[in-house]
Image: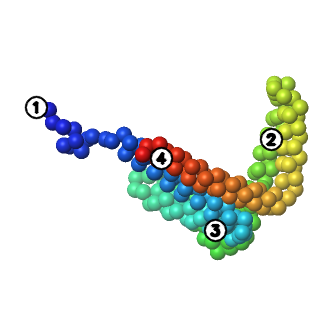
Amino acid sequence: MTSDPDDYGLRIDANTLERTVAQRFKQFLLVTGAVLLVIGLLILIWPGHTAKAITALLAIGVLFSALANAAVALTPGLPGRARIVAALVAVLFAWAGIWALAHLGSATVGLAFVVGLFIGIAWIIDGIAALVTLGDAPSKIWAAIFGVISIVAGVILLIGPITGAAIIWLIVGITFVIMGVLQILRGLRFGNQTIKATL
């Protein structure tokens, strides 16, 4: 005697499953699109406040790292040196996190300065690499143009890292808004087409 799979709730309706998956994916696209759009608009409308909020989140993350290192320092059976290093790191992280939260404006400017410097250096290295490997490039003209622009942009960023970081921050905001709108439109179109096809 064979039992019906449906008696155990094992039978799956392909149309229902496909419709459910499509609806879930539609929700995912709409939610991620809305999040990107909101973050992008916040960056464009309140760039300074948004940067401060992100700096505050990073500072809180540093404080959690301080707690984790403090826990390591208090772990029984750990060698003395490891405990001392973990304790020092915990104190340093705790100080940095508390200072950043207490001086949010200065911490945000400092973070922008460091980010600007790193991006500037990365662009210069990228540009030099493009020029050095010019012989292997499929299009030497475009590779040369990219290399020169990358080096010039990197130097400009090193001269004014905070201004450069602020411009990049605004570009990130614009990109997030565009990506958010496209993601929402994609979700609406994908969901409607797939659900109609399965009905």
Q: What's under tag 2, amino acid-wise?
A: Ile
Indicate which disc, 1 or 4, sits on the residue closer to the N terminus: 1
Q: Distance between the residues labelled 2 and 1?
A: 73 Å
Q: What's under tag 1, amino acid-wise?
A: Met
Q: Residue 1 carries which label?
A: 1
Query: Which callout, 2 or 1, points to the residue nearer the camera?
Result: 1
Label 1 element class = loop
- What residue is rendered at 78% in x and 54% in y? 117
For label 4, the residue is: 196
Label 3 element class = helix
Viewer-closest of 89 and 122 = 122
Q: Residue 55 carries which label?
A: none
Tell me if mark 2 has few (under 14), some (14-19) or many (20+) residues whose alpha carbon lies within 10 angstroms of its own: some
For label 2, the residue is: 125
Tell me if mark 3 has few (under 14), some (14-19) or many (20+) residues whose alpha carbon lies within 10 angstroms of its own: some
Query: Which callout, 4 or 3, points to the residue nearer the camera?
Result: 4
